Amino acid sequence: MPKNNKVRVLNQEYYNQQSKLSEEEKQRLMLTKKHRFKMLLILGMTLFVTLFLGFSAIRNNIQAGMLNQKATEAKVELKNVKSKNRELKQQVEQLKDADYVAKIIRQKYYFSKKGETIYSLPGDKSKSVTDN
């Protein structure tokens, strides 16, 4: 026995047409949602990669600046050490000269030759041998 429906569709063509449009609209909305999700996913990934690369570039730039600063400091230190080395080599060469060593001993430690008298003046740098 057929089921007795209390609701009857009066205009079957119109109803079928509206149902078809409704189905098409639902499919279009689903595709739009899928496209929107895909676009947001792609945008999010692109943003993440861009931020990651940007921060990496900034970090590398900061590290390069720090290395350049250290290199500059090392060059200045090397220059100072080379200058000090030259002075020390010059002093070693001077200390090989007996006359220079005698002069230094006489000035610094008030060493005198036989029969010589040394007088200390008020402007002398050291007052006695123990001050050195």
Image: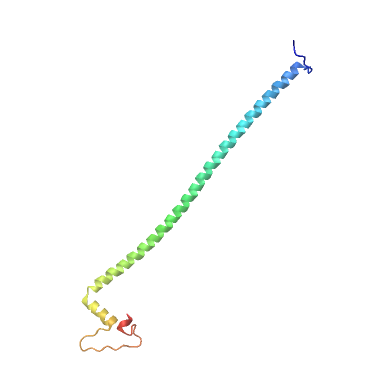
- Position of residue 91 relative to residue 52, above or below, is below
The answer to whether 67 is drawn above or below residue 81 in the figure is above
Q: Which colour scheme is used?
A: rainbow
Question: Residue lying furthest front in this view?
Answer: 1
The structure residue drawn at horizontal position 69% and vertical position 21%, both measured from the top left corner, is 20
Locate the C terminus and report the quarter of the image it occupies. Answer: bottom left
Of residue 33 and residue 75, the one placed in the foreground of this image is 33
Residue drawn at (52%, 41%), measured in percent from left and top? Answer: 49
Q: Residue furthest top?
A: 1
Q: Give residue 124's position: percent from left, percent from top.
A: 34, 85
Q: Indicate the position of residue 4 as horizontal and vertical percent values.
A: 77, 14
The residue that appears at 44% across and 56% down in the rendered structure is 66
Number of numbered discs: 0
On the rendered structure, is 87 left or right of 35? left
Q: In which quarter of the image is residue 45?
A: top right
Residue 21, how many percent across, how many down? 70, 23
Q: Which residue is at the front of the view, 78 or 9?
A: 9
Left or right position of 82 against 51: left
Q: Does residue 121 appear left or right of residue 59 in this picture? A: left
**Residue 22: x percent and y percent?**
70, 24
Q: Quadrant of the N terminus?
A: top right
Closer to us: 79 or 108: 108
Determine which quarter of the picture holds residue 2: top right
Q: Is the residue 3 above or below the residue 89 in the image?
A: above
